[in-house]
Amino acid sequence: MGFAEEAPSGGGLEPGELVAGQYEVDRCFARGAFGFVYLARDRNLQGKQVVLKGLTRPHDTAAIKLAAQESRVLTALEHPNIVRIVNVVTHRGLRYLVMDHIDGPSLRSVRDAGGMRIADALACAVDVLGALAYLHGKGLLYCDMKPDNVIRTRRSAKLIDFGAIRRTGDRESPVLGTPPYLVGHTEIREHGLTERADIYAVGVMLDELVECDAGEPGAESFRRLVARATADFDRRFADVPEMLNQVRGVLREVRCLADGKPRPARSAVFAESAALLDDGLSLAPPLTAWTGDGGGALADGRPSPADVAAGLPVPFPDPADPRTPLLHTVRAPDPRRLLTKLASVPASVEVDFHRARANLEAGDLTAAGHCLRSAERQLGWRAHHDWRASWHRGLLALAEGRVSAAAELFDDVYRSVPGEPAPKLALGFCAEHRSRPDTAARFYEAVWACDRSHAGAAFGLARIRLRAGERGAAVAILDEVPEISLHRHGAAVAAVRILAGHLPGGGRPAAADLAAAADRLHTLTLDSEESWLRLATAVLESAFSFVLDHGDGSLPPGPVLGDPVSEKGLRDRLERSYRELSRQARTADEHGVLIDRANAVRARSLW
């Protein structure tokens, strides 16, 4: 139903012709399936440009019916992304629609001129989907989505040409869509034209508009978005709001990766998680760093798969599940008591998902597996397409240490909700655990670039930089954790430990690193004096080792390292620290080890 540039062969309007005593024809600039389209000027509005659309086959009953339908529909619609009809007039016995003139090219012209960048195409998709959501909300299907029927202005995209529009559930009217944007005959036969048919057409259109390299920021998420929109009926987005939510998420990712500016947004399908996904790097060193086997290179803080399974975000319950309202009220302080409460809730898929997560948290993996199998039985054939089932299967696989299997399941979730950070965070950890740092970094960066509240992604990136020996880069990432974040304090602690620590690859801190660690430590407030003392002792040890190698005065003075910084001064400070640490000892053996350290580092007197 799009417009092709073609002049009428006869019987059309001529340049200068006055229609209905008001609209002066400028020229015919396009032709639709049933009508010519003219550019004209409204004499009553100081020559404002308008568009006239009239029939090419005035005696065609079907064409007349469709034109009348388009007229009725357009006069009842009012949406910023739908062309506005301003009048319906009769001229020489023919009826003409008078519409706003939209100044801009069609997306077909944009594509033919070289296509669009991902961000621009997605921004147009947001507008188009907004218009479709409006139509679907009124029980209407557009049925002829394609680049020809979308005009791109400076500020938005607008739908034109409503000749193929039909009521939802209408299986009698002729199908007027345009291949390849029209769904296949099998789908039409089995389901008719539905909202998913409009979604399919948007996906095909996006695919045509964009040519991107695999390494382009956001390209992977964009391709997965298109694949979901154009998938078979059962795997496709079920409605426009579902797709629109994912389009916005992918658009945020593309823009944030491109300009480095975060654009946080609350997920519509995943709850926020307070877990950090860190194994101690955000905390002061434990006492075992001096009394046990905790010495040596700085541990990078990578959490175990089981800990990650317990800390990843949780999907919101499916609104269509009958028990969802009740589940919103069920609370308990620990997983065992939660399971007791859930035992009294009537069965449903979401109840089983809740039970599975509680059992995972309680460490009962066998029971968690039983709950997931029960949920899948209730889902039936839909279990193969339900991303929530894949997500929970992925959590169970992680808890069982089957990281490769978990990655496959989380990848399936990513295919279903490509605009969500949660599956990317999960895939980042899986890649990190499988020693694929480049892949892990790509996923972590996609999350961190969009939203600085996902501190787990920042710690993941810092660990990758740490293992690559990039001390400064690791600290720079942690410094991006915002002050308002729950994990800002942990990031500050981790930065001090990284600056002062011996890296896993053997790298030792430089003078500037140690000076920065001492400066940060001086202003850092920890949860207790005992924790601060342990972190300070770790910094003093690294500084002492540096001064032994480079001599007195090789480090700048300060409150933590002393003024001046000397071997004797650091020995005195370390001795005091070890003796104070001995008060934290839980056993006589630990106390003895720390006193031995104090004696060993004590400066020797000549007397």
Image (cartoon, rainbow, N blue to C red):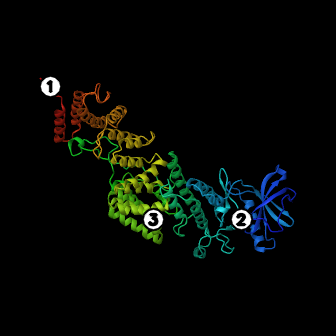
Q: Of helix, strand and loop, which one carries label 1?
A: loop
> Gap between marks 3 and 2, in whole Å?
51 Å
Mark 1 or 3, closer to the camera: 1
Amino acid type at mark 1: Ser
Mark 2 or mark 1: name the one nearer the start of the chain.
2
Amino acid type at mark 3: Val
Residue pictured at 39% horizontal, 43% vertical:
473
Q: Residues within 10 Å of mark 2 (few under 14, many from 20)?
A: some
Q: How crowded is mark 1: few (under 14 residues within 10 Å), some or many (20 or more)?
A: few
Image quarter of residue 133: bottom right
Q: Of helix, strand and loop, which one carries label 2?
A: loop
Whether pointer 3 and pointer 2 mark residues with C-beta atoms closer than 8 Å, the reply is no
Amino acid type at mark 2: Ala
Mark 1 or mark 3: name the one nearer the start of the chain.
3
Q: Which residue is denoted by mark 1 in the rendering?
A: 605
**Percent x, y of residue 383:** 45, 68
Residue pictured at 53% horizontal, 67% vertical:
231
Q: Which residue is denoted by mark 2 in the rendering?
A: 4
